[in-house]
Amino acid sequence: QVLACSAIAVGCAVVRKFALGVPDGPLGSGFAIGAAGTASAAGNLLADRLTLAYVAFFACCAGDTWASELGILAKSHPRLIVRPWKVVPPGTNGGISGVGLGASAAGGVAMGLLHGVF
């Protein structure tokens, strides 16, 4: 299941590293090597987009996990996302709470900041 859920992010990383030939580093730090062996600005832009897709993928995963794990600690009862007037028990699929939404946002921001720092 972990491989299936991470396949998109792994694909982005593999294409960035091996197909474009961009070394690891921050956004805009490397140049993609084109077919003729020359640096390509378009390839570099694609490499940056692949990096952002990779980070965004794991930011979504972190947000989902944080919301699930911390949202159940909310004192208020969650509401169903498709019918917000309906109160549901904690742990119900599709149930959201303020604590869960905050935790989800924090998980995504944490991944983004970690990428920016490292």
Image (cartoon, grey):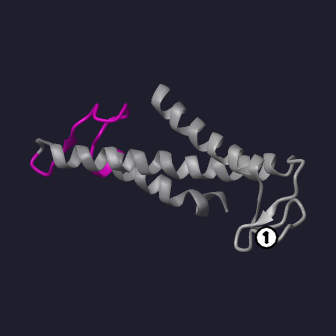
Label 1: which residue?
85
Disc 1 crowd rating (10 Å Cα; few below 14, some 14-19, many 20+) is few
Q: Is residue 118 visible?
A: no
Q: 44 above or below 91?
A: above
Residue at point 16%, 43% (across, down): 41
User: Relative to the observer, which residue lies in front, 98 or 95?
Assistant: 98
Prevalent SS, magenta region: loop
Give percent across and percent down for residue 20.
Answer: 27, 48
Q: 104 above or below 26?
A: below
Q: Is residue 69 magenta?
A: no
Q: Is residue 2 visible?
A: yes
Q: Quadrant of the N terminus?
A: bottom right
Could you tell me which secondary element the residue under label 1 belongs to?
loop
Q: Is residue 35 magenta?
A: yes
Give percent across and percent down for residue 107.
Answer: 64, 42
The three-letter amino acid code for the residue at tag 1 is Trp
Span of residues in magenta: 17-36
Q: Is residue 101 left or right of residue 59?
A: right
Give percent across and percent down for residue 49.
Answer: 34, 49
Residue at point 52%, 52% (across, down): 57
Q: Is residue 70 left or right of residue 56?
A: right
Give percent across and percent down for residue 35.
Answer: 14, 52
Residue sitting farthest toward the front: 85
Q: 81 above or below 75?
A: below
Q: Is residue 59 left or right of residue 84?
A: left
Residue at point 22%, 37% (across, down): 31
Residue at point 49%, 34% (across, down): 115
